Image (cartoon, rainbow, N blue to C red):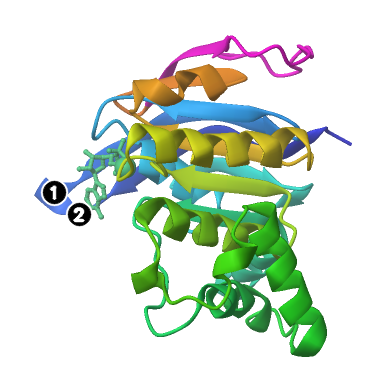
Amino acid sequence: MSNYVIEAKSVEKTLGRGAGEVRALRGVDLSLRRGELTLLMGPSGSGKTTLLLVLGCMLTPTSGSVTVCGTSTSNADREKLAKIRREHVGFVFQSYHLFPTMTAAQNVQLALDIRHERGARAAKKSRAALEMVGLEQKADVLPGGLSGGEQQRVAIARALVANPSVVLADEPTSALDGKNGQSIMRILADTAHEHDRAVLVVTHDPRVVPFGDRIVEIEDGLIVEDRWGKTDRPRMPRTAPFGA
Ligand code: ADP
Ligand code: MG
């Protein structure tokens, strides 16, 4: 059994139709492992979001394969893909996506609700997830009463509450100032290192580079670089070297 949580092989993705057709991914190999925070960097339009959505089974590749926790997503229908997402993937987006009329705790608990986990146990788990991001004091506050950084921490708690194997974050710090961005990255790094999850952070924010155990650069739908970052995490050999 592979130690990779997600393995993408020879992934191509074409978006749009006819004259508007774009080859957003042109043959990408990328595997993510537990305990590692990977940064996916590249210019605007290079395919970062598309790759994140393909890895998270929100989009299916035009060709190539994606395997999540040993389950191949080839030939999976919408329902099966939704099941894989629910069981294994937590998403974090640039613009938090919180429901404005629900408290922080209710927003987090919603992620359990869709997994049919309800009642006192779900409420307790949601509080614990908020505690993990340092927001236990704000559990009963509506998003409108929270700063941007706090809202993003609620979104991270929501991504973590169902105990995913992988967390995929698309530009999670882009709307935040430096200090809040750093605190979000520290939480995501802890998520990888202390909670042994695979974490992928899509970013074009150079301030987050110090948090990357591994840095992958994408240009024009192709991975052009895959290197270790400057964190002091143990370096394990990769079984599928970049470009293989
Ligand atoms: P990034 O996140 O790196 O900015 P994206 O993955 O969003 O890049 O987009 C990659 C390319 O695909 C871009 O050229 C973008 O314009 C194009 N694209 C994204 N979504 C669509 C779509 N729904 N239809 C057509 N082209 C799209
Ligand atoms: Mg994007």
What residue is disc 1 on? Answer: 20
Residue 51 position, x and y percent, is 44, 40
Q: Residue at x 43, y 47 (%)?
A: 62
Q: Residue at x 54, y 46 (%)?
A: 168
Task: Look at the magenta stretch and give its main secondary structure.
Answer: loop
Q: State the residue in front, 45 or 175.
A: 175
Residue 55 position, x and y percent, is 55, 45
Residue 77 position, x and y percent, is 58, 69
**Residue segment shown in magenta:** 222-244
Q: Tell me, yes or no, if residue 57 can be seen here.
A: no
Q: Residue at x 69, y 59 (%)?
A: 131
**Residue situated furthest bottom in the rendering:** 119
What residue is disc 2 on? Answer: 17
Element carrying mark 1: helix
Going by the numbered disc 2, the residue's amino acid type is Arg
**Number of residues whose C-alpha sits closer than 10 Å to that of mark 1, classed few (under 14), some (14–19) or many (20 or more):** few
Callout 1: CB less than 8 Å from ligand 1: yes
Residue 128 shown left or right of residue 189 in the figure: right
Q: State the residue in front, 122 or 244.
A: 122
**Tag of residue 52:** none
Quarter of the figure with the N terminus: top right
